[in-house]
Image (cartoon, rainbow, N blue to C red):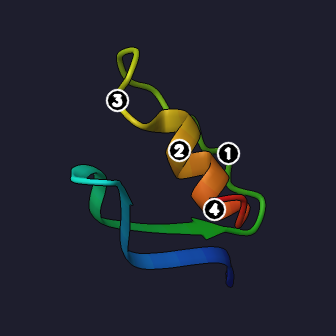
Amino acid sequence: MSSIIEVKGLKKDFGALQVLKGVDVSIEENEVVCVIGPSGSGKSTFLRCLNRLE
C-alpha cells in the first residue's frame, strides 16, 4: 500500500512554547487512525498542521 499522508519531524511552536516536537506519522490508504490524548496535549494542533491550517 502507499502512504496517503506522511510526515517526518513535524514541529509547532506558539512563541516560546513548543507544542509538537519531532512528530513522525505515516497513514496508509484504507487505514483508520485515531488521535487520543488528554486535554491540551496538541491533538487539534496536530490535525490542523496535517491539514495545513497551522
Residue furthest out toward the front: 15
Which numbered disc flags the more N-terminal residue, 4 or 2? 2
Instruction: Tell whether label 3 touches label 2 (CB within 8 Å).
Output: no
Label 2, label 3: how far apart the Cα atoms are: 9 Å
Label 1, label 3: how far apart the Cα atoms are: 21 Å
Position of 32 relative to 15 (above/below): above
Question: What residue is drawn where x is 67% and y is 45%?
Answer: 32
Instruction: Tell whether label 1 touches label 4 (CB within 8 Å).
Output: no
Residue 34, position in %: x, y? 57, 35
Residue 19, position in %: x, y? 31, 47
Residue identifier under label 4: 50
Label 4, label 2: how far apart the Cα atoms are: 9 Å
Question: What residue is drawn where x is 40% and y is 15%?
Answer: 39
**Disc assigned to residue 32:** 1
- Which numbered disc, 1 or 3, marks the residue closer to the eye? 3
Q: Nearer the viewer, residue 48 or 25?
A: 48
Tag 2: amino acid: Thr
Q: Nearer the viewer, residue 18 or 29?
A: 18
Quadrant location of the N terminus in the rendered image: bottom right
Tag 1: amino acid: Val
Tag 3: amino acid: Ser
| Secondary-structure class at tag 3 | loop
Residue identifier under label 3: 41
